[in-house]
C-alpha cells in the first residue's frame, strides 16, 4: 500500500479508502483514477466491495498484539497478516491487550469458542516473551517476538545481519572511521544492530573504536545529542550509522547546525526505512524492517495444512541505498 501511495502521490489512508471501495469519502474522481492506475501498475490486489464469500462464513485468524498505537510497524504487520489471510478468504480479528494477562486469557477463551483457524501472538518490540498458557490450545505462531523454550514457531527481523549489511555499505563507500549511535541498551534490536556493526568492522580488518560508539534513545533528540558528542570529542568520524531513522533525523540536524555537509562531508546511515527517510535532504540510506513480510509469514503458517515447526525464522532486512551513505571527502 505504501508503494501505491508513493506512485499515486497520495497518502496511504487515501489508497486504503479507494481500494476498499469506500465511495462515501470525499475523494475526487481524478485521485481515485490515479490510485487505481498505480495499484494496477504495481500488481496490488484490489479488494472488491461486496465480494461474496466462497462459503457461508469466513474462517478467522486471531491477531493479538501488546500495543498498536505506539509504533508505525504494528500497522504494517497487521496489513501483512490481513493481505495473506484475505487471499484465502480468511478474516483477521485484531486485539490490543497492553500485556494484560487476564484480558489475553479472556480473548483466547473467546477464540477457542469461536474455533478460530489459529492465533498470531505479537509484540511491537522484538524481545523474549512468556506466552499465556491458553495459547497452547490453539495453532499459534509468534510475531516479532520469541520464547526461551522455543515451543512455538516465531518470526523476527534478522537484526544482526541488518546491522552488518548497513556497515558493509559504508565500508564499501570508502569509509573507515564509522561511528555507531545505538538505541537504548535494554532493547534487543539495538543490541543486535550494534553486534552486526562490530562484526562488519572486524571482517574488514577495521578495529572497533569504543570512542565512536555513543548511546542514543531511538528518538531525534538522542541522535542529535550523540552526533554533537561525536563532533566534539576526538577525531571526527567520516560516517555515522544511526540505529534507527528517527535518530538519523537528529543526526542530520546536528550536522547542519555545525555546518557539516550530510552526504558530502560525513555520510549517514539509518535503520527502519520509515516514511521520513526518503524525504530528508539528502535522502537517507537505511535498512528496511520486514514487518509486512513477517505478517505474511505468520498468516501462511496458520493457514498451512500442517503444524509449523517450532523454530525461529529470521527474515532478511534489505539495504535501501539512497544518497546519504557516500561522501565526496572520503578519507
Image (cartoon, rainbow, N blue to C red):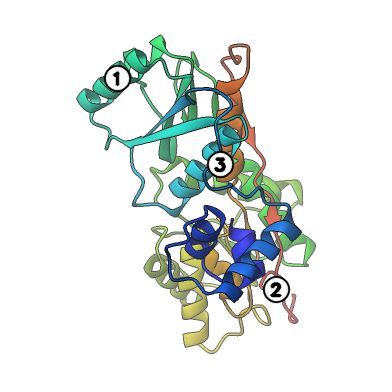
Marks 3/1: CA–CA distance? 24 Å
Residue 44 position within the rendered picture, expressed as x and y whole percent measured from the top left: 67, 51
- Are discs 3 and 1 less than 8 Å apart at CB? no
- Residue count near mark 2 (Cα–Cα under 10 Å), binned few <14, some 14–19, many ≥20: many
For the residues carrying marks 3 and 1, which lies nearer the camera in this image?
1
Would you place residue 85 above or below residue 70 in this image? above
Q: Which residue is mark 2?
A: 323
For the residues carrying marks 3 and 2, which lies nearer the camera in this image?
3
Residue at (28% x, 34% y) in the render = 97
- Dividing the picture into quadrants, the one containing residue 158 is top right
**Which of these two is toward me, 234 or 111?**
111
Would you place residue 251 above or below residue 299 in this image? below
Residue 298 position within the rendered picture, expressed as x and y whole percent measured from the top left: 56, 29
- Residue count near mark 1 (Cα–Cα under 10 Å), binned few <14, some 14–19, many ≥20: few
Residue 19 visible in rendering = yes
Marked residue nearer the N-terminal end (3 or 2): 3
Q: Which residue is mark 3?
A: 80
Would you place residue 249 above or below residue 270 in this image? below
Q: Which residue is mark 1?
A: 110
Marks 1/2: CA–CA distance? 50 Å
Residue 94 position within the rendered picture, expressed as x and y whole percent measured from the top left: 38, 36
Element under disc 2: loop
Marked residue nearer the N-terminal end (3 or 1): 3
Q: Residue furthest left?
A: 102
- Are discs 3 and 2 less than 8 Å apart at CB? no
Marked residue nearer the N-terminal end (1 or 2): 1
**Which of these two is toward me, 245 or 192?**
245
Q: Quadrant of the N terminus?
A: bottom right
Amino acid at each position: 500500500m505504501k508503494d501505491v501511495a508513493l506512485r499515486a502521490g497520495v497518502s496511504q489512508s487515501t489508497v486504503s479508502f479507494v481500494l476498499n471501495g469506500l465511495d462515501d469519502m470525499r475523494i475526487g474522481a481524478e485521485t481515485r483514477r490515479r490510485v487505481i492506475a498505480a495499484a494496477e501498475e504495481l500488481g496490488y490486489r484490489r479488494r472488491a466491495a461486496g465480494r461474496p464469500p466462497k462459503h457461508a462464513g469466513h474462517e478467522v485468524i486471531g491477531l493479538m498484539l501488546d500495543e498498536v498505537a505506539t509504533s508505525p510497524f504494528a500497522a504494517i504487520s497487521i496489513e501483512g497478516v490481513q493481505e495473506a489471510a484475505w487471499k484465502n478468504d480468511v478474516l483477521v480479528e485484531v486485539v490490543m491487550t497492553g500485556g494484560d494477562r487476564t484480558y489475553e486469557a479472556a480473548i483466547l477463551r473467546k477464540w477457542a469458542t469461536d474455533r478460530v483457524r489459529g492465533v498470531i501472538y505479537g509484540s511491537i518490540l522484538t524481545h523474549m516473551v512468556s506466552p499465556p498458557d491458553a495459547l497452547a490450545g490453539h495453532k499459534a505462531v509468534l510475531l516479532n517476538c520469541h520464547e526461551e523454550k522455543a515451543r512455538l514457531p516465531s518470526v523476527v527481523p534478522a537484526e544482526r545481519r541488518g546491522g552488518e549489511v548497513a556497515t558493509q555499505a559504508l565500508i564499501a563507500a570508502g569509509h573507515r572511521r564509522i561511528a555507531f549511535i545505538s538505541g537504548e541498551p535494554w532493547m534487543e534490536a539495538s543490541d543486535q544492530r550494534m553486534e552486526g556493526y562490530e562484526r562488519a568492522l572486524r571482517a574488514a580488518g577495521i578495529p572497533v573504536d569504543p570512542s565512536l560508539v555513543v548511546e542514543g534513545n531511538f528518538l531525534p533528540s538522542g541522535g542529535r545529542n550523540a552526533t554533537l558528542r561525536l563532533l566534539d570529542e576526538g577525531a571526527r568520524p567520516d560516517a555515522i550509522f544511526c540505529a534507527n531513522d528517527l535518530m538519523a533525523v537528529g543526526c542530520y540536524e546536528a550536522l547542519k547546525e555545525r555546518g557539516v555537509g550530510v552526504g558530502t562531508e560525513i555520510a549517514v546511515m539509518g535503520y527502519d526505512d520509515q516514511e521520513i527517510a526518503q524525504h530528508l535532504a539528502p535522502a537517507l540510506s537505511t535498512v528496511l524492517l520486514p514487518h509486512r513480510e513477517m505478517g505474511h509469514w505468520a498468516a501462511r503458517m496458520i493457514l498451512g495444512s500442517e503444524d509449523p515447526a517450532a523454530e525461529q525464522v529470521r527474515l532478511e532486512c534489505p539495504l535501501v541505498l539512497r544518497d546519504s551513505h557516500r561522501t565526496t571527502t572520503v578519507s
